[in-house]
Amino acid sequence: MMLSQDALTRLQEVAVLWSVGSGTPADVIEAACDCLVAGVDSPSLRILAGISSTQGGDSDELRRWLGDALAELSLTYYRQGSREGEDEAVRIMARRLLARIITPRDLTVWAYRCITRDGTPLADELINLDNTYEYVEAVIYDGQEYPAAAAAKVDAGVIAEAGRLVAGTTAEHE
């Protein structure tokens, strides 16, 4: 059985990721159900958990009840596309990398696809590193180091950047 704090953390995270287009309504509804199972309860959380996941694509209904449920649980609601939500999503994904839930490459691909260059500046270095992966994969090894060694260096850079993001510091070049 999931502990109530774990369930709340998961609800907060999936809500943030959904706000940046990296999660589904079903993820949010499932996290709301997990909260109820873990003993966390509020009126809006019950309604949120009761939204049909097949109809959960109706973002207006999900958005309406999600904001209320998060407020009742003293969690933060980030409106879709907000800079604050993007910042928090980047930190969530960086923590997942550091916890070895995702790979360095997964993190950079996610940043490139979900945040993009138009998003939060917090993701800029991750997007640059995604481009570096692309370059390393395309390199012709005419006297250059093997791509595996080069990719390992990029991995180390991504891990270092994730550490900075979680610690709240900025990259050295900024």
Image (cartoon, helix red, strand yellow):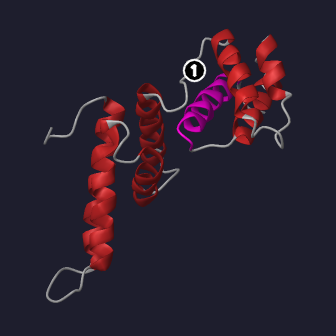
Q: Quadrant of residue 60?
A: top right
The residue under the point 30% across, 78% down is 138
Magenta segment range? 4-21
Q: Quadrant of residue 59?
A: top right
Residue 168 picture location, percent across and down = 30, 29
Q: Secondary structure at mark 1?
A: loop
Quadrant location, the N terminus? top right
Q: Nearer the viewer, residue 142 or 86?
A: 86
Q: Nearer the viewer, residue 84 or 5?
A: 84
Does residue 145 sit above or below 53 in this rendering? below
**In the figure, is residue 33 to the left or right of 119?**
right
Residue 62 picture location, percent across and down = 73, 28
Q: Nearer the viewer, residue 141 or 51?
A: 51
Does residue 48 sit above or below 44 in this rendering? below
Q: Main secondary structure of the magenta part?
A: helix
The residue under the point 43% across, 44% down is 115
Amino acid type assigned to the residue bearing label 1 in the image: Tyr
Residue 172 visible? The answer is yes
> Is residue 163 highlighted in magenta?
no
**In the figure, is residue 132 to the left or right of 3?**
left
The residue under the point 86% across, 36% down is 52
**In the figure, is residue 27 to the left or right of 96?**
right
Q: Nearer the viewer, residue 120 or 143?
A: 120
Residue at the disc numbered 1: 77
Q: Could you classify mark 1 by the number of other residues whose Cα lies within 10 Å: few (under 14), some (14-19), or many (20 or more)?
A: some
Number of labels in the image equals 1
